[in-house]
Amino acid sequence: MSTAARPERPLDAPTPGRGRFRSVAVFCASSPGADPLYAATAAQVGRELATMGIGIVYGGGRVGLMGVLADAALGAGGRVVGVIPRGMVEAERGHTGLTELVVVESMHERKALMADRADAFLALPGGYGTLDELFEAITWAQLGLHDKPIGLLNVGGFYGALTSFLDSIVSAGFIQPAFRRLVLADESLPGLLSLMTEAPRPAGAGWARPGTA
Ligand code: AMP
């Protein structure tokens, strides 16, 4: 057995022990999108997560990519928890076949409960709602309110413009490089999940302005 001293773990090194995710919050569109690739990918993600034994927490609707994701996961024997505001049960066609459907009173409660019930966040393509949910998860991580990894599934390059924009915000001095690393992206689900599993927990939780840390 070697007696050499172990090198100190660099701040950015993967933190051991995050382990496998039991549940992932999936943010995705309430519409199907213009390219059939989006729905096909949502279905594949649903099936893959179910097969991996990873539960899904999502917005609870039957519409758009949300419904496709949920149905595919359920069809593959997965656990799917929906969290839907009472006022949206009709508009988003609250899914009655889920493992559990939690009806909450507000959008804020929805996001908070989705965050509580998941070990990680995954964004598929979507619109304002998806981006709102995604950025709240990111800003909560930046504030140190959680240390769960956040991944963008870059389906057909969908998130390329956003990740470039984030890089340009770093260059402009409004996002610290360490916080830029909170947002992971990959084109395949297995690739993204392994990035998320290996991601270091954000060190020095808590907010700091660029240049002040
Ligand atoms: P979209 O990406 O715009 O199709 O929306 C995706 C999902 O985000 C839908 O289920 C919306 O109800 C949901 N959503 C939109 N805005 C919010 C919000 N402020 N808080 C929580 N969920 C939201």
Image: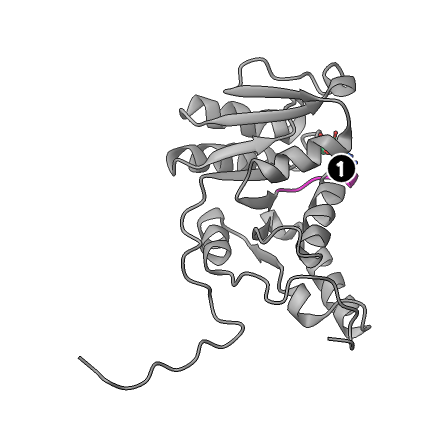
Q: Is residue 174 left or right of residue 78?
A: right
Above/below status of 195 relative to 169: above
Front residue of this view, candidates 200 and 205: 205
204 vs 131: above or below? below
Does the beta carbon at disc 1 come under 8 Å from ligand 1?
Answer: yes
Magenta-drawn stretch contains 126 = yes
Residue 213 seen anywhere in this rendered image of the structure: yes
Quadrant where the C terminus lies?
bottom right
The single residue placed furthest to the left in the displayed view is 1
> Which residue type does callout 1 highlight?
Gly
Residue marked by disc 1: 129
Residue at 49%, 47% in the rendered image: 189
Task: Return the x and y of residue 147 as percentages of the image width and height.
Answer: 58, 54
The N terminus lies in which quarter of the figure? bottom left
Q: For label 1, count other residues whose C-alpha is less than 10 Å away and answer few (under 14), some (14-19) or many (20+).
A: few
Q: Is residue 134 magenta?
A: no
Magenta-drawn stretch, dominant element (helix, strand or loop):
loop
Quadrant for residue 69, please give it.
Answer: top right
Q: Nearer the viewer, residue 161 or 28?
A: 28
Segment tinted magenta in the rendering: 124-129
Q: Quadrant of ligand 1?
A: top right
Is 190 left or right of 124, judged from the image as shown?
A: left
138 or 189, which lies in front?
A: 138
The reply, left or right, for residue 92 in relation to residue 79 is right
Q: What residue is at 67 percent from the left and 23 percent from the top?
A: 63
Can you give x and y, in whole percent of width and height, for residue 133 in the image?
Answer: 71, 41
The quarter of the picture where residue 163 lies is bottom right
Q: Would residue 29 be visible to someone looking at this image?
A: no
Residue 113 placement (x, y as % from top left): 64, 33
The colour mode here is one colour
Q: Secondary structure at mark 1?
A: helix
